[in-house]
């Protein structure tokens, strides 16, 4: 297997683990904790890679936000108003290396324009309560077509987007049921016709008119008794908006999972052939423009899969973890 890249996984209870040789060997990252935190409390729920520095990453945890400058081997804690909150999403601004946005369970979205020295909470009219208690900001995406446009996915409150760098916000809902607003994954497929892609428990939703209207595609159920075919993460092959991956399973956390892929922009889908069936829902993906052919994926209950041919074939790594909520990879 091609191994000149580092895989990072974010676990619940064991911080970040990294493999500098594409999954052959693993080490636990060194993370500087606040004085009150115990190592077993570090629950990583998001990982993000800087588009300005391929070796710089962010990790969101219960204890706050972390930054690594060495492919995830060591992490420095960033002082922020998110300390003690569950951070579910984080991203670097593609037009400014000093601007970072992060989303929490409160829910809230926070932004720094000076690499974490000062922070501002964006005013977004997200519901304070939902079916699952406090909504979570599961995704933050800066629109590659217009760097003043921000997309925010909320579990459970649909999609919010701003065209003026966060000064004002619009709310978009996928369907008429509360479950339809349970946003798990968010992506933009930019091309001749831009598609907004959103995964919820009941499938992948697509909008061709900037969130004005939506259509949903559901996947085959794993058993007759299942009411839905659960969906979690969504990822695009870099440079190819027609190749899309969706993490699928029988439920959350579930007992079975699959990686669904389309190569024609969503017209047709098929489950990827995996050497070992996932032991739970396939939760997240990692892609990187440094090599569009490399895709990493994880099941919620600790399996890690790697493809070096954009999903045509997959290897399940020997190393298994407890619970994985985030995964990514970076070039060495």
Image: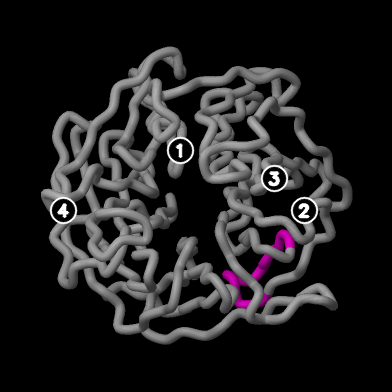
Q: How far, Cα to Cα, is label 4 from label 3?
A: 33 Å
Q: Is tag 2's residue or tag 3's residue first in the polypeptide sequence?
A: 2
Residue 3: % across, % down: 36, 75
Point out which mark residue 222 bears.
Answer: 4
Q: Is tag 1's residue or tag 3's residue first in the polypeptide sequence?
A: 3
Q: Is 36 left or right of 332, judged from the image as shown?
A: right
Residue 27, relative to residue 165: is it above or below?
below
Q: Tell me the mark number nearer the camera, choosing from 1 and 2.
A: 1
Q: Is tag 2's residue or tag 4's residue first in the polypeptide sequence?
A: 2
Q: How far, Cα to Cα, is label 1 from label 3?
A: 15 Å
Residue 216: % across, % down: 28, 28
CB atoms of marks 1 and 2 within 8 Å: no
In magenta stretch: residue 164? no
Q: Quick one: SS at disc 2? A: loop
Q: Which residue does the numbered mark 1 point to in the structure image?
A: 182
* Residue in view at x 58 percent, y 48 percent: 51
Residue 19, relative to residue 125: is it above or below?
below
Q: Which residue does the numbered mark 2 point to in the structure image?
A: 82
Front residue of 29 and 152: 152
Q: Residues within 10 Å of mark 4 (few under 14, many from 20)?
A: some
Q: Is tag 4's residue or tag 3's residue first in the polypeptide sequence?
A: 3
Which stretch did the figure color magenta?
64-74
Q: How far, Cα to Cα, is label 2 from label 4?
A: 38 Å
Q: Is tag 4's residue or tag 1's residue first in the polypeptide sequence?
A: 1
CB atoms of marks 4 and 1 within 8 Å: no
Point out which mark residue 214 bears.
Answer: none
The type of colouring in the image is one colour
Q: Is tag 1's residue or tag 2's residue first in the polypeptide sequence?
A: 2
Q: How far, Cα to Cα, is label 4 from label 1?
A: 21 Å
Q: Residues within 10 Å of mark 1 (few under 14, many from 20)?
A: many
């Amino acid at each position: 297997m091609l191994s000149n890249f580092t895989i990072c996984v974010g676990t619940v209870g064991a911080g970040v683990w990294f493999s500098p040789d594409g999954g052959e060997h693993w080490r636990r990252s060194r993370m500087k904790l606040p004085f009150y935190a115990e190592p077993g409390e570090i629950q990583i729920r998001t990982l993000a890679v800087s588009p300005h520095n391929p070796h710089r990453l962010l990790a969101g945890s219960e204890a706050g936000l972390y930054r690594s400058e060495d492919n995830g081997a060591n992490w420095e804690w960033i002082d922020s108003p998110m300390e003690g909150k569950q951070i579910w999403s984080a991203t670097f601004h593609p037009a400014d290396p000093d601007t970072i946005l992060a989303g929490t369970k409160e829910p809230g979205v926070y932004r720094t324009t000076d690499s974490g020295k000062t922070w501002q909470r964006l005013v977004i009219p997200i519901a304070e309560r939902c079916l699952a208690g406090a909504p979570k900001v599961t995704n933050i995406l800066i629109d590659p077509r217009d760097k003043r446009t921000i997309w925010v996915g909320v579990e459970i409150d649909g999609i919010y987007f701003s065209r003026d760098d966060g000064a004002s916000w619009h709310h978009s809902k996928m369907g008429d049921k509360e479950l339809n607003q349970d946003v798990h994954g968010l992506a933009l497929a930019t091309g001749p016709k831009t598609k907004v892609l959103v995964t919820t428990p009941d499938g992948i939703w697509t909008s061709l008119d900037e969130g004005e209207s939506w259509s949903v595609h559901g996947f085959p159920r794993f058993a007759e008794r299942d009411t839905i075919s659960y969906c979690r993460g969504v990822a695009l092959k870099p440079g190819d908006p027609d190749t899309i991956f969706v993490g699928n399973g029988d439920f959350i956390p579930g007992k079975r999972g699959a990686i669904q892929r389309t190569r024609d922009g969503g017209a047709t889908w098929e489950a990827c052939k995996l050497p070992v069936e996932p032991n739970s829902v396939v939760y997240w993906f990692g892609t990187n423009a440094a090599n569009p052919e490399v895709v990493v994926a994880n099941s919620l209950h600790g399996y890690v899969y790697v493809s070096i041919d954009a999903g045509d074939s997959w290897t399940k790594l020997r190393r298994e973890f407890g619970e994985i909520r985030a995964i990514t990879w970076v070039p060495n």
